[in-house]
Image (tube, rainbow, N blue to C red):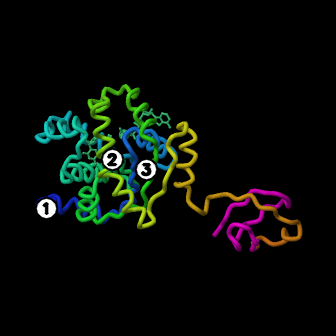
Amino acid sequence: MGTVNVANKDINVSLAEKKPRVVFVLGGPGSGKGTQCANIVEHFHYTHLSAGDLLRAEIKSGSENGTMIQNMIKEGKIVPSEVTIKLLQKAMLESGNDKFLIDGFPRNEENRAAFEAVTKIEPEFVLFFNCPEEEMEKRLLSRNQGREDDNIETIRKRFKVFLESSLPVIEYYKAKGKVREIEAAKPIGEVFEAVKVVFTPKAEKVKKVSVFPFLCSKTIVHLPLMADMHCTYRLLPRPGLQTLPVIN
Ligand SMILES: Nc1ncnc2c1ncn2[C@@H]1O[C@H](COP(=O)(O)OP(=O)(O)OP(=O)(O)O)[C@@H](O)[C@H]1O
Ligand SMILES: Nc1ccn([C@@H]2O[C@H](COP(=O)(O)O)[C@@H](O)[C@H]2O)c(=O)n1
Ligand SMILES: [Mg+2]
């Protein structure tokens, strides 16, 4: 990052004070990041910030960086972190939310280190959509959203950048135990079922357990289970096979 001026310092302080919760959404071009983020927003009330969308909006706005960004996108190259991070910070502050899906960022080690250094924000986890190139290529070539980089020449460049620069970032977070990997080469609905499991808080996950009648006289009971040995469950009035919410 270049020098930090007073205005940027203020932005960083305001953001840090808000203690935002951030999930990085990563995966190859066309793996379905944007599609799944839209579903997550609807169900889990995050704000979706796509770094690519913010950069494309910056081109349209006629900003002084517009031509540089446009050229980088056409070549499938990664725009300097300083530019992208400023756009992300601004969008985070303007949103009024404190839960963010940051899609397509960090794209390389420079993005990752600069974001952490400037914002002091660590992601809660990284959602990684793993998809074979063949499937991603097919999806991008039929996306039809008028994107200048959805042509076979640029797509190949984007795949190369993903393998060489973005995968190492995913490996970095894997080593920290922060990656939640999703098999993305399935129909949209099936992919979202797997995504939902990642976003559903542990305490809300419902388990089916067999409750024997003699246990039903108590409100709370410790049940020895195969998967997690002693969990506390709130008992429902009827005995038999029941769905019980886990309460610890
Ligand atoms: N699971 C899926 N099965 C089939 N098609 C899909 C699936 N998920 C997304 N698509 C389609 O594939 C195309 C690319 O999806 P999307 O824009 O969500 O990918 P992305 O990861 O955000 O790509 P990029 O990195 O280029 O922005 C879209 O036309 C979308 O409708
Ligand atoms: N962190 C980023 C993210 C994106 N870019 C550039 O935008 C292009 C499109 O990104 P999508 O996520 O919408 O596919 C990408 O190929 C890069 O040129 C970037 O520079 N930095
Ligand atoms: Mg996208």
Compare marks 3 and 2 and give the one earlier in the sequence.
Answer: 3
Between 75 and 35, the residue placed more toward the observer is: 75
Residue 182 in the image, given as x and y percentages of width and height? 50, 50
Separation of marks 3 and 2 at Cα, in angstroms: 25 Å
Q: Is residue 219 magenta?
A: no
Q: Which residues are magenta?
A: 222-248
Image vertical order of residue 187 relative to residue 25, above or below:
above
Which image quadrant is residue 160 in?
top left
The three-letter code of the residue at mark 2 reads Phe
Residue tagged by mark 3? 46
Residue shown at 48% from the left, 56% from the top: 180
Compare marks 1 and 3 and give the one earlier in the sequence.
Answer: 1
Residue 115 in the image, given as x and y percentages of width and height? 26, 59
Separation of marks 1 and 3 at Cα, in angstroms: 29 Å
Residue shown at 25% from the left, 37% from the top: 56
Residue tagged by mark 2? 162
* Circle 1 SS class: loop
Dot 3, crowdedness within 10 Å: few (<14), some or many (≥20)?
many
* Circle 2 SS class: helix
Looking at the rendering, the quadrant in which ligand 1 lies is top left
The three-letter code of the residue at mark 1 reads Val
Residue shown at 10% from the left, 40% from the top: 64
Nearer the observer: mark 3 or 2; the answer is: 2
Image vertical order of residue 120 relative to residue 181, above or below:
below
